[in-house]
Amino acid sequence: MHWWQTGVIYQVYPRSFQDTNGDGVGDLAGIAARLPYLAELGVDAIWLSPVFPSPMADFGYDISDYTGIDPLFGTLADFDTLVARAHALGLKVILDFVPNHTSNRHPWFVESRVSRQSARRDWYIWRNGAPDGGPPNNWLSEFGGSAWEYDAASDQYYYHAFLREQPDLNWRNPAVRAAMHEVMRFWLRRGADGFRVDVIWHLMKDEAFRDNPPNPDYRDGDPAYKSLLPFYSTDQRQVHDVIRELRAVTDEFSDRVLIGEIYLPVEKLAAYYGANLDGAHLPFNFSLIETPWRADAVASLIERYEGSLPAGAWPNWVLGNHDRPRLASRVGPEQARVAAMLLLTLRGTPTLYYGDEIGMTQVPIRPERVCDPWGLNVPGQGRDGCRTPMPWNASRHAGFSSAEPWLPLAADSAVSNTESAAADPDSLLTLYRRLIALRRARPALTHGTYRPVAQSGTVLAFERVVDGEALLVALNFGAEKANNVVLPNIYRGTVLLSSSPGRDGEATAGHLTLRADEGLIILRDS
Ligand code: GLC
């Protein structure tokens, strides 16, 4: 099996992990310094949100040079050091590849915009306005407003699925593809172990640029972007040809991974593995983030997902990232323990978001400190609250920086930080460490089959089985005790790991009682 199948991925948001040069923003040297913490946590790979030169209109997701490091984060030499240190600790390094759009200050776009005759005109998506004036079609930006920006000098519009500072590249142009393939090779040669590809399902758009249809489920108060179904602007059949090429470049190097960011229903993820499993190794599965936190809803989601995977495709699960409210705020601090057990026992590769292992919550951001452009465009949509600095200890600025951090620290950082959590045998961090260690030690958890066992009321129970080893995972999604959970296939077993204190080693037989908000992993007697 490959490392990206058996391993656990950990997402680092570089701005907020560890600052070493006292500017209040995290950097590569900081990440390198904190690698021992990650090795001790037990993860296998880190994925870094973008660290490339950028005007930071969208905090690095607007790249102006694909083969450099932004001075805010350090230098190429710092990157090389980080990779060398990570590899020495057995950690892989996954980069964020943002091929859908560049910064509007990227030299390619600057040249493209000069005139209709520019040699790079066709590197971006330029269209004439509609015959009766206005933008070429009704497509909307995910971050608010029309997705078309008028350029008076050439009397044409360019397309941007996100900010106007993020013009979309034209992936129908072979020169664009070739240039981006070279970018991938640049980092793969330098030792990157693969990529998480930003908004991969956006890469191709309808050739005829037809209007998107209205969304019949749109409700007042939803963001305007949701008023249309992005039928012609995303998830086009031809995107799979583009992804197959990205995969082929990845495969020029040994043992690298291609992960795709895709916000689509689980049934639609199947196609992103590629018709012959020659697409993304891991099309990110965000469905747990979007599903109501109830045992029945999660059970049916797992069934739908498992049922839709193509033969040979490897599953994956995600509970948080830099675009979504913090896990512990969504499900509550008690259920965050159950969520950790679920994520680390489901079949497939788990991706953790930095700080979720210590139960970081959404940090309230005062209006004058809002940084996220989405939050500035559409009040209430801001993502700053899940991107706040990692609290390491009780010192000033929580050990994150010697200066005031770019976003506020959580108010409880002095008491709730990695140092205090590491010292507490019952902390969420300790639970994460034990779960990851157990996952590594038990083949049933890394590559066993998944079998649903029971779902009733607030309880979900499933089995992971391999070569005679059977583990039962029983999770109580409720805040009340669950009595007398009947386990038809587990007659006798022993609790290997409990999310609440005092039950490890307990013998079980046929029936179970789960405490409120409790999860158990039980080894079936052979
Ligand atoms: C992805 C990123 C998000 C970014 C957007 C545009 O969804 O995760 O942070 O704003 O793409 O690049």
Image (tube, helix red, strand yellow):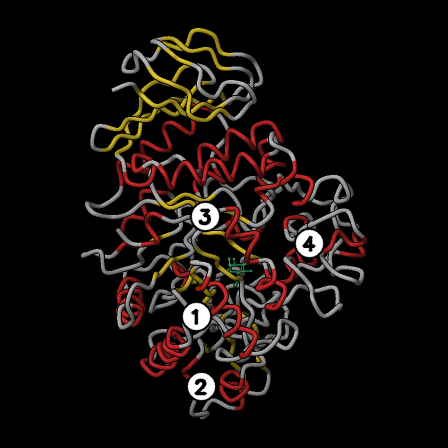
Point out residue 271 in the picture as x, y percentages from the top left corner: 27, 52
Q: Residue at x 28, y 40 (%)?
A: 447
- Kind of residue at disc 2: Arg
N-term-proximal mark, 1 vs 2: 1
* Residue in the foreground of this view, choosing between 206 and 83: 83
Q: Residues within 10 Å of mark 4 (few under 14, many from 20)?
A: many
Q: Secondary structure at mark 1?
A: loop
| Label 3 SS | strand
Task: Determine whether, in the image, residue 376 is placed left or right of residue 519.
Answer: right
Tell me which amino acid carries mark 3: Thr
The C terminus sits in image quarter: top left
Q: Quadrant of residue 205?
A: bottom left
Residue named by callout 1:
99
Q: Which mark is residue 389?
A: 4
In front: label 4 or label 2: 4
On the image, the x and y values in percent for residue 422 come to 62, 40
Q: Residues within 10 Å of mark 2 (few under 14, many from 20)?
A: some
Residue 121 bears which disc, if any? 2
Q: Label 3 near label 2: C-beta < 8 Å?
A: no
**Up/down of 338 relative to 201, above or below:** above
Check disc 4 and give the amino acid type.
Answer: Pro
Q: Earlier in the sequence, mark 3 or mark 1?
A: 1
Q: Cα distance, mark 4 to mark 1?
A: 27 Å
Tell me if the residue at label 3 has its CB under 8 Å from ligand 1: no
- Helix, strand or loop for disc 4: loop
Residue 203 in which image quadrant: bottom left
For marks 4 and 2 on the same chain, the one whose residue lies earlier in the sequence = 2
Cα–Cα span, label 3 and label 4 = 19 Å
